[in-house]
Image (spheres, coloured by chain):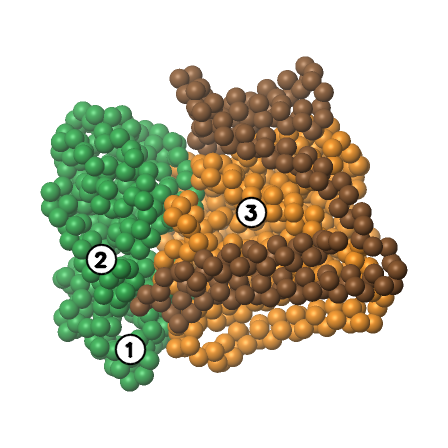
Chain colours: A green, B brown, C orange
Amino acid sequence: MTRLPLYAAASAAFILSGAAVQAQEYPVDTVTLITHSSPGGGSDVFLRELSRYLAPYLGANVIVENVSGGSGASAMARLAQAPADGSIFYATTPTFIYTSLLSDPEYKYTDLEPLVNFFIDPEVIYTAADSEFETLEDVIQYARDGRGQWGAANPASLERQALEQLKAAADVNAAVVTHEGGGDLMINVLNGTLQIGVGEVQEIQSQLEAGELRLLATFSEERLDAFPDLPTVAESGYDVVVRKFRGLAGPKGLPEDVITAWEAATQAVLEDEEYKAAYEAGNLRAEFIPHDEYNAFIEQFGTETSTFLKETGVIE
Amino acid sequence: MLTRDFVGGVATIVIGAVYLYFAYQLRVSALDDSMGPGGLPRIYGWLLVGLGSILVIQALVARSLAAPAGAEPVKGEWDGQGRKIAYAAGLLVIAMGYIFIVETVGYLVSVGLLIVTTALYLGAGFSGRLLAIGIGGAVFLYAMFVSLLGVRMPAGMLAPLGL
Amino acid sequence: METIALTASYLFDWHILLAALAGVTWGIMGGALPGISPSITMALLLPFTYTMDPTGAIVLLASTYIGAEYGGSVPAILIRTPGTNAAAATVIDGYEMNKQGKAGLALGISLISGFYGSMFGLAMLMALSGPLALVALNFTPMAYFALGILGLSVIATLSGENLIKGFIAAILGLMIATIGSDPVTGGTRFTFGSSELLGGIEPVMIMVGLFAMSELLIQASKRGADERVTSRPRIQFPDWKLTKRLFPAQMIGNGIGTFEGVMPGAGGTIASFMAYNEARRWSKHPEEFGKGSPEGIAAPETANNTVAETALVPLLSFGIPGSNSTAILLGGFLIHGIVPGPMLFERSGEVVYGLYAGLFAAIIGMVIMGFLMLPVCIWLVNRPRPYLNAFILALILSGIYSIHNETFDLGIMLAAGVLGFFMRMLRFPFLPTVLGLVLGYLVESNFRRSLVLSGDDFMIFIDDRISLSLLLLAFLFIAGSIGKHVYDAFFRKPKTVSES
């Protein structure tokens, strides 16, 4: 809910990067990355971390600004009206597509131009360690026998869609309960109110290590490197795959040199040893997608989501 | 004769009715729970209409009880209220004026003008002290919010000066 | 014991002491500015913590948090403007005391209560983190709903003469809370296509409007009449007799604050209103409440400062932030690669003990800074009315703007001011509106969530033991208040309308 210019972040990032060699001449001095996450939130921390390492590779000052009104609606409005000179970008997650489709704001994701993708976060299904459920099949069976209670972090989100699709694929009747964020959800899984929750590995990392939570399956296409024994949902017989992307989008009509600069800088920063250690520790999976492919990716994602929302009657 | 409670009750009913009108237009979807987005708002709306009606009835009953007993009628309840509202409205206009000019004129100048105008309106005489407080107050607020806290107040026409 | 020894060993680290003092000073300042919430005050420091050592960074942020939660009471007492949401309850009696020329004592009480509250909260955090975390863990959506209803039961006390008007005011607050996106489906409600309203209305805009703006309008309407008593610019701590009188109120604040603090999402605002209500219920002088009762300041201030400490329990134990402020603190941990949660004590114990030591130092620092800074504030509000009010208007218009950098929000604040003006003119209490506004979302989202869980079976609220006991408690409170009103209406001398 706050919108703050954190100039100091910029100067800190710039000082840190002072020693590094500037890769090329970027058209503007300062790049503003906007997030709809509030300061300290998941996307915000991710972006601040990224901005520290990105500045030297891009050859520009990188600052982070929080524009958190309306789950991304304010951020999209701001971007769509900004100059397309490479000075301002929006850090996107599937939220911006959901907000566009659900809230029908004045400016939507289609009014922005996807730039590049950085990461695909794995979404996993977890349960309390002391629960009776050992596999995803146990959970589905429980729901088949009576009434399952599953949890998603936010009302209209990728996690909710994933669970609704799983429900449909398994043909069971489960209540999908939405929460106010991952922490709220985790408490209700831990105290047994819910059988399962869906979230990113990084959100539940601490509880996993302490042995309080158990993973049941992952919604990713392939098994995760960190958890080679964890089956995918598709392997378990339900064809649901979820790709939670983290990338950037800018105003329409981005110049060619800006796009090239970002494609180069993104690949370089993802290879940066120090940054790699930091993001791998946080269970983020690097997946660089270049500009052209990313446009198609976002378009496809948008179409799939819109189809889902129409089929369930959420939107017309 | 209109008592405060009567006016308050009628205003409550009107607010409740307008709110209900919009509450009944909320969309439903398959992802909804059984209450839906409109469930509680409708309850709130009807409660407001109901409570407003009770207040109106209370006011009417109280008046009819008071009148035959020969008690002092509620005359004088509204004496001078019109002038009071007008004085308050004046301050509101000044505040709205500030909102209107701040984006074009810029924060530093607008907030100084706001302090001076408001103080004059509230009865401070025009003096050197008033100007000093206007300028000092504006500089102080600018230092707090813009320099120290980094809030991006509108720069307006002062933008070329970096203020 | 081991905890205390380890914590004490960090008390002489000048690094931590400096961070604590800087944080608490910055926090008091940010908290005292209306519109600048504790979370914004903390977020502004976040970038500086990148280059600090982890313990120093966490101490800086946490000290800012407790400083800001205390700082909110200063404008609440002096200019009828709650600096933070949680200071709303302090306005009631704090501003009354100020009007009676007792600003120095009011500020002294809030400072000493803030000190007690924080120290008690810190002791709870250090000693009972484990059991308290267990309480938080067992709070289901049903229990949260019941907690919200318990909070709403305070309306009856805040309503004053006419219970009907109190309920109307509360529903107005609940209605304002429905603006924005729906908690279950994520669809929009009552936004009329405005993107500014998508995220809902920040309670502080309405509070500043209802409290401060309406007061400015009322004073403008009275033209020139300046009936206040000026206070001496000196902080006055309560004497022994008053200390004894305040003690029960502070204990109530401690208890409620500890309980509410550990619930993620419950927060200091509810705690301070409930503490105010209970202090009044158990007070030997309940008739003084609302007319400048010292207990009316002590209870909410103790409660919200206790919350500021115990709110760290769910953060440290589960890694779950219960509010915007603790979310930023979580960010501060994550930036330094520390993940709060069950493994925190094993992996980064030194940070936790450093944090305890830092908080201890910050609480001491809070009293010192308060003692130094407050006389200047009293002197400032003793200036002639026209100048003071002009400055307050400029201050709140600046503060509210800085929340989202939108002039739209200034319009909302002014509208709330006009609403407050007419509510006061028609003798409606507006504290219930504030309560409804703060609790509306909590009550609605958890009510509907529970029904989704149970498949629309209302028995779920009775089957859940915590929910059942809280609901019974709320029922007792409400029934008691209504009973008293009915009794007064029928068996006491009726009051004439013109007096109401």
Q: Indicate left or right for A314 with C300 as reference.
A: left
Asked where in the image residue B31 lies, by quadrant, the reply is bottom left
Query: A117 or A166, which is in the foreground?
Result: A166
Give the alpha-carbon distance from disc 1 to disc 2, as whole Å. 23 Å
At label 1, the amino acid type is Asn
Q: Kindly tell me whether residue A200 is visible in this rendering.
A: yes
Residue A306: mark in rendering: 2
Label 3 near label 1: C-beta < 8 Å? Answer: no
Give the residue furthest to the top: B128
Report the front residue among C120 and C156.
C156
Tell which of C19 and C452 is nearer to you. Answer: C452
- Which residue position holds label 1? A173
Q: What residue is shown at x 13% (from left), y 62% (from top)?
A: A222
Whether residue C363 is visible here, answered yes or no, is no
Q: Given the image, on which type of amino acid does mark 2 rest?
A: Ser
Within 10 angstroms of label 1, few (less than 14), some, or many (20 or more) residues? some
Q: Position of residue C488 (x, y in %)?
A: 79, 68
Image location (x, y in percent) of residue C271: 60, 58
How many discs appear?
Answer: 3
Residue at the far left in the pictured view: A292
Give the residue at x 28% y 60%: A315
Q: Amino acid at mark 3?
A: Ile
Residues packed near mark 2 inside 10 Å, few (<14), some (14 to 19) or many (20 plus):
many
For label 1, the SS is: loop
Chain of the residue displaying label 3: C
Q: CA distance from mark 3 to mark 2?
A: 36 Å
**Mark 1 vs 2, N-terminal side:** 1
Which residue position holds label 3?
A: C206
Would you say C270 lies left or right of B6 here? left
